[in-house]
Image: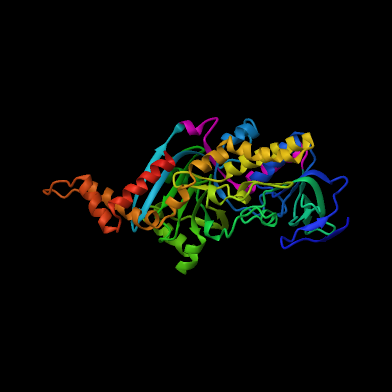
Amino acid sequence: MRERAGPASTAVIVDQPRRPDFDAIVVGAGPAGSAAALELARAGHSVALLERGPFPGAKNVYGGVVYGRVLDELIPRWYDEMPVQRWVTRRQTMVLDGERSMTVDFRSQNWGSAPYNGATTYRAEFDEWLAGHAQKAGAVLVPSTVATRLLRTESGRIVGVRTDRPDGDLTATVVIACDGVNSFLAKQAGLVPGDQAAHTTLGVKETLALPRKTIDERFGVSANEGVDIEMLGCTQGIPGGGFLYTNAETLSVGLVLGLRGLAESGRRPEEILAELKRHPSIQPLVRGAELVEYSAHLIPEGGYDTMPRLVGDGLLVAGDAAAMCLAAGIWLEGVNFALGSGMYAGRAAASALAAGDLAGLREYKRLLESSFVLADHKKLRKAPGLVLSERMQRRYPGLVCDLVEGMFTVENPRPKPGVRKLLRASAKRHGVTLRELARDALTGLRTFG
């Protein structure tokens, strides 16, 4: 194969392969990559699924919530076989300020039976399970392999990847980049707009071991029921939020922290996480737990307006590589968007391959727009700016806790103050004008309504 160095993108220029090694190469065996490979293999196409770890999930230390509706389409009756820790039947949104907190607590036993709403799971187990389905359908898993460069023809069409293996060039008609946040391949293809650091956060998490019975008692659940708690006001003013999920015999507790805000604070993420665990509302839940794992992971947080172009000449981008993660306060989702985007990328690629016309790859964008993947991101495109704003992060948690504390503090024989009086006093105390409050409330209604 004749080749020469490519332009500044570091792609390698090669001759058009007469017979590609595969119809498609999928880079990354996470949820997006395995879903894409599964769809392609089911359609009868040859597909290589590259994974940098020794097995799918080996590099992942996530323990969080997977929402199942997209899996209904990808793997019917997935809930009969997916490796589940607990079925989420209780969802809490918690606002913290100092040693105070205000919690909205919702419980539904409907979520504890098929077809279920969400489940906590370990990514190491989930990824291996999903990739196994792709392999059973005919995909070739290539572990311990890193895609280092794109292969292009003289005309610029992407025709494969160079790997870190000896003689490791692999050619294909289509490449699907599912290589995670800060996608190296999407950047090489020139699809990523500008500097993404301002739209990237650091997720840090501890996995804490507790007996199943203790978890059941502390969180008010039984059998395989689980709890998902999302938090605001727990990051010491750094843009971000917190979470706590129950697994079978462990808890996943962590933070999502804006990279620039974290750097400017001079704080270490594990220090902020330790403070969260000492909070009076959290400490009773984690008391006596044994630390079994600490992990950190970059997360794309900018939403729809920071997504790269999703279709290149012979290339599709899906999952975290496409910034498809929704961190919008009451909706904190990522895996379901990865599954959906990977599934639609696989379908678009399969259709284009069957038609022998790569122009059909543009169908990928239409599929995403007609599904929840881009519809939800478009609807909530202003949510990251609102949720990560200075007022929402630093002022509103205190305002909310002041308001609720004032409503329920009994000061007989003095009469109870009205809500408007309490709101004005709290807003003034925290440096929020009523105009700002009204404007943010209107933005929230337009965003989430």
Horizontal side, residue 107 vs residue 337: left or right = left
Query: Would you identify the image quadrant in which residue 272 lies?
Result: bottom left
Q: Observer-nearest residue: 168 or 250? A: 168
Judged from this view, the residue extending furthest toward the bottom is 266
Judged from this view, the residue extending furthest toward the left is 413
Query: Would you identify the image quadrant in which residue 133 lies?
Result: top right
Q: Looking at the picture, how far across and down is residue 372, in whole percent?
A: 55, 37
Query: Would you identify the image quadrant in which residue 353 lies?
Result: top right
Residue at image point 27% right, 49% down: 403
Horizontal side, residue 192 vs residue 431: left or right = right
Q: How many discs mark residues in the rendered view?
A: 0
Image quarter in which the C terminus is found: top left
Residue at image point 45% right, 32% down: 109
Q: Observer-nearest residue: 273 or 165? A: 165
- Range of residues picked out in magenta: 110-139
Residue at image point 36% right, 44% down: 442
Q: Looking at the picture, how far across and down is residue 175, in whole percent?
A: 74, 47
Magenta segment main secondary structure: helix
Q: Is residue 371 visible?
A: yes
Judged from this view, the residue extending furthest toward the front is 155
Q: Looking at the picture, how far across and down is residue 336, in whole percent?
A: 58, 41
Q: Looking at the picture, how far across and down is residue 419, in whole percent?
A: 23, 45
Q: How is the image coloured?
A: rainbow
Q: Is residue 208 magenta?
A: no
Q: Is residue 200 visible?
A: no
Image quarter in which the N terminus is found: bottom right
